[in-house]
Amino acid sequence: MMMVPSKISSLLQFFTLLYLFTVTFASTEETTALFKWKATFKNKNNSLLASWTPSSDACSDWYGVICINGRVNTLNITNASIIGTLYAFPFSSLPFLEYLNLSRNNLFGTIPPEIGYLTNLVYLDLHINHISGSIPPQIGSLAKLQIIRLFDNHLTGPIPETIGYLRCLTKLSLSINSLTGSIPASLGNLTNLCFLFLHVNHLSGSIPEEIGYLRSLTRLDLRNNFLIGSIPTSLGNLKNLQVLLLNDNNLIEEIPPSICNLTSLAILYLSRNNLKGKILQCLGNISTLQFVMMSHNNLSGELPLSICNLTSLQVLNLGRNNLNGAIPQCFGNMSGHLEILDMQHNNLSGTFQSTFSIGRALRSFNLHGNKLEGKIPRSLANCQRLEVLDLGANLLNDTFPMWLGTLPELQVLSLRSNKLHGPIRTSRFMKNLFPKLRIIDLASNAFTAELPANLFQNFEAMKRVDQTVEDSNNKEGGYYQDSVTVVTKGLELEVDSILSLYITIDFSNNRFEGRIPSIMGNLIALHMLNLSHNGLQGHIPPSLGNLSSVESLDLSANHLEGEIPKQLTSLTFLEFLNLSHNQLQGCIPTGRQFDTFEKNSYEGNDRLRGFPNLEGCGNSRFPKTNNTTHELEQESDSTFLSELNWKVVLMGYVCGLIIGFSITYLMLSARNPDWLSRIADELEYRILLRRRK
């Protein structure tokens, strides 16, 4: 074995000791600096950071600290309930820090410009805190940064141009803040960027053409800002792009044909802008499309047949545009993979010719507010997964589609404002219909005959208040939510998250007659019941007092009679009540919610009395006022009449007593009382006869 000279050996030992001394000294400096930062926390006794003590080894004992060669490399203290700022953070004392994750804490204040000292930083994550102020331009000096996650804070000001210097950046997420100004063109330099998330801010100006240079981009999310101008044609260069979300801005002009070059696109969201022109025929060439949302724009023209080529399409939402023409028959063939078809509030016309086959995937079918004619497609009964069916506000001419009751998952059925007619006939042999129905809206049609009591008996989902509803209408992190138009509390509303919020029955503005079935009192989960503007008769069932969840009750403009049931005062959630224009009588109940309703809730019932009407009841709650001269005169007259009545009664009593004594005296004098007995027997016989009748 070769012997190492003693001088060389001594030198090796010296440098080893020097290295160990240097490492130990540097680690001590970092430990001291981090401990000083911890001392600024408002909750110094944080349980997760209890290991941060001067006497322990930061590299081996401290929570969230990882060292390499004795130097702090990683600081990962996410979700640790830290309450503090970054002002005392030792940026200059951590030159070897590569990974910094302080997300999901309670950090406040601003990001200090000293963050520029972390020149070896690769990962920066401060999301879900309360950090405010602007993003310091010094962040552009962190040349090794690959990931920046600052979303869900309170950041303001512009996006610094210097971020464009970070050529290694692959993910940039600044969303859910209050950033202002335009999107800097310098972001086009980030050729390695895969994710760009700037959504839910206050960004303005146009989308820079330079975004089209980001050839590595797979997800671009600019939704919920104030962006203007047209969609740049350069976006067509973003070939391994899968998600493009530009909704909820102020974008104008036509959709550029270059969008059809995005052959990897799966999600295209352009809703709630001011886009115009026709739907691109070439969209049918993007075979990877799964979600297409273009609602709330000014798109026009007919539906392109090429959409039927999209064999991966799951959601198609073209609602609230100016589309016209007929619905292509091939749409029925798409129901094998299409889950959501929403084309509400357009100008679509003609009859619906599509045929839906058995076992289809369709869950939501919304054609509300068009000009469709003819009958409801009977083949919809084949869509066994259907949850939402809204064909309201069209020109459909049909009877009630009782066959839809066989759909096991149907939760929303809206057929309002059509030309539907005739009675809703059910049979006692027809059971288990509409088992999951939560919204049924048949308002403004021409239905006749009595309300279908047997139908209400089937509404099992309306009988359970404590049911847990799976909000299955949310897809892929909220890319789609079902909505339906309902009329509640006298207002027409478009309601989202409908499967979990509303349970309603609206049969108003028809020609129903007869009595309100008392069985409706079993539907205790109802939030809204509207039977107004029909020909209903009889009394209001006291069983409606069982509807403990009801918020809106409208029985106006019928022929209801009798008293208002006192049981209705137990409806503690009732905010809207309309019993006007009926033939109700008696005293209006008082107490709880009934003390809050105005006179218009009862007008048009001439025989109703009590609060808040002018004619009072004995127990009505009118505020006491000072007697006027007129009231004093009335009181004086009343007292006089009362005294006069008593005098008359007393005189009559005395006269009757004298006459009675006289008759008795004559009878006894005659000693022949048989005639009196006959009179008594006759009276007894007549009393018994009346009781039998």
Image: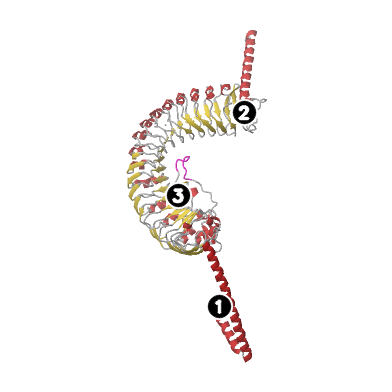
| Quadrant (top left, top right, bottom left, bottom right) of the N terminus | top right
Residue 477 is a magenta residue: yes
Q: How crowded is mark 1: few (under 14 residues within 10 Å), some or many (20 or more)?
A: few
Please name the amino acid that badge 1 sits on: Arg
Q: Where is residue 632 in the image (x, y as percent from the top left)?
A: 54, 64
Q: How far apart in space, not on screen, are marks 1 and 3 (Cα)?
A: 60 Å
Q: Where is residue 486 in the image (x, y as percent from the top left)?
A: 44, 51
Residue 270 is a magenta residue: no
Q: Mark 1 points at which residue?
A: 691
* Side of 632 relative to 324 (left or right): right
Q: Mark 2 or 1 closer to N-term?
A: 2
Please name the amino acid that badge 2 sits on: Lys
Helix, strand or loop at mark 1: helix
Q: Mark 3 points at which residue?
A: 387
Q: Where is residue 582 in the image (x, y as percent from the top left)?
A: 45, 62
Q: Which of marks 2 and 3 is in front?
A: 2
* Side of 617 relative to 361 (left or right): right
Whether tag 1 and tag 3 are in contact, CB under 8 A, the answer is no
Instruction: Establish if 468 lies above or below 555.
Output: above
Seen from the viewer's position, the closer of residues 655 and 588 is 655
Magenta stretch: give its range.
472-480
Q: Which mark is residue 639?
A: none
Seen from the viewer's position, the closer of residues 549 and 414 is 549
Residue at far right of view: 55
Whether tag 2 and tag 1 are in contact, CB under 8 A, the answer is no
Q: Mark 2 points at which residue?
A: 38
Please name the amino acid that badge 3 sits on: Glu
